[in-house]
Image (cartoon, rainbow, N blue to C red):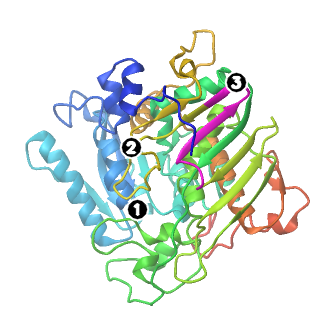
Amino acid sequence: MRERSPAGPSRREFLKAAGGSAVAAAAVAGFPAVVPASVLGPHAPSSRINVGAIGVGRISRGHDMPGIWKVDTARLVAVCDLDAKRVEDGKRLVNDYYARKTGQPYAGVTGYADYRELLANTDIDAVVISTPDHWHALITVAAVKAGKDVYLQKPSSLTIPEGRAMSDAVHRSGRIFQIGSQQRSSPQWRYAAELVRNGRIGQLKTVKIGLPGDPPGGSTAPMPVPPTLNYDMWLGSTPEVFYTEDRVHPQSGYGRPGWLRCEQFGAGMITGWGAHHLDCAHWAMDTEYTGPVEVWGTAEFPKSGLWDVHGAFRTEARYANGVHMIVSGEFPNGIRFEGTDGWVFVSRGNETVTASDPQSRLKDEQALAASDPRIITSVIGPDEVRLYESLDHHGNWLECVRTRRQPIAPVEVAHRSCTACLLHHIAMKLPRRLRWDPDRERFVGDDEANALLARPQRAPYALGA
């Protein structure tokens, strides 16, 4: 059994101890800190940020669009999806929200079937991209070239070279980019990172990250392509394969889509939730702009069915500062930092983003625990390391769009955390220790491993085509 400290507070207790702020508690719970009396609010139309939503499926409807529309300085003006049914559902969802807030009929949302047409609309200032993973980098690059600021769902890219191209394009453009690593905007994650950075557990030695795997399954029976879906474009840069509903998304409702469990479109939970946890681990380790120098591991992969991402696994990494990272479903869902003088464990507690999120293995709301009560009741002093503070991830991005300062999860940080996840995925495939050069972003002396860094791209959807 996992060690447990009697000092481990529940998520509610932690928020109360963090300042007793109802605003903070509301923001971390996923509700707006301030709900305006009217969507239009006191802001003139010329000062509002017009946002387009690209991809309006499960994560967009339940998380990203609500994260935008609750902020008084922004207005969702467009939705885009390759499934025409979802475009209409998205328009209705947003229009109905604004109608309730204004108390009058509202029909100000435009629907698009092609993201390029949305990006060509000069009235749109910024986009929130909530598509499947294999479209993330391509649309982001196109968006910043079109002069749009970007909020991107994690993980940042399908491959490491795509992520590098995306980060470079964002930096060249000068646009504001935020990755959807929203754990950074929950106070327990920031506080855990500050405790580690300020030596409350002594010298950091080991980081244990708990992540579940995915089950096998999925129907392999070909099906007719729904008339509402542009399936060829949905496949994008990935190979042409027959349509079946379990490969794409449900045609009825907005449950967990099958593409999350297909390696053609992603890497499974190692990037799905790993992008969150490895990012927060890097934050505490002060390795946000680098990566491991060695990775190794094993994993189980399905032997039948459509879904082929990893199941049970254990992967490990070593960093230049000597820290040893272990990622496995053997651990509770969260991060445990172990040092010479104790440990800190941090998790989401009972918080979920969507109803279909994998649940933590914790039995209660516990969000923060430590080997000694004094660790998590200590105060970070004014002369100690204080990390970027945000209590609303979408709100932080929108504020940075207005002020042009960098948000809490900028593009290079996104690329580096995704890179680490993809390295763990490659380590699942090759039965040996792999040496990594984080500066050159290449494996050292290993042509077979380097061949796995990129994937062939299908025309006309290749990045840079």
Which residue bears the numbered disc 1? 117
Pointer 3 and pointer 1: residues touching (CB < 8 Å)?
A: no
User: Mark 3 belongs to which amino acid?
Assistant: Asp
Residue 416 as seen in the image, left or right of residue 185: right
Relative image position of residue 101 (x, y in whole percent): 15, 40
Pointer 2 and pointer 3: residues touching (CB < 8 Å)?
A: no
The residue that appears at 43% across and 53% down in the rendered structure is 359
- Residue 350 — which label? 2
Instruction: Find the magenta span and give its range.
Output: 329-343
The image quadrant that residue 456 belongs to is bottom right
Given this view, does label 2 or label 1 mark the residue nearer the observer?
2
Given this view, does label 3 or label 1 mark the residue nearer the observer?
3
Q: Is residue 266 visible?
A: yes
User: Mark 1 belongs to which amino acid?
Assistant: Glu
Relative image position of residue 445 (x, y in whole percent): 91, 60
In the image, residue 94 sits, relative to residue 8, either above or below, namely below
The residue that appears at 38% across and 47% down in the rendered structure is 352
Q: Secondary structure at mark 3?
A: loop
Relative image position of residue 164 (x, y in whole percent): 69, 52
Per the model, the C-alpha gap separating discs 2 and 1 is: 40 Å
Residue 389 as seen in the image, left or right of residue 78: right
Which residue bears the numbered disc 3? 341
Q: Tag 1 or tag 3, which sits nearer the N-term? A: 1
The residue that appears at 18% across and 45% down in the rendered structure is 98
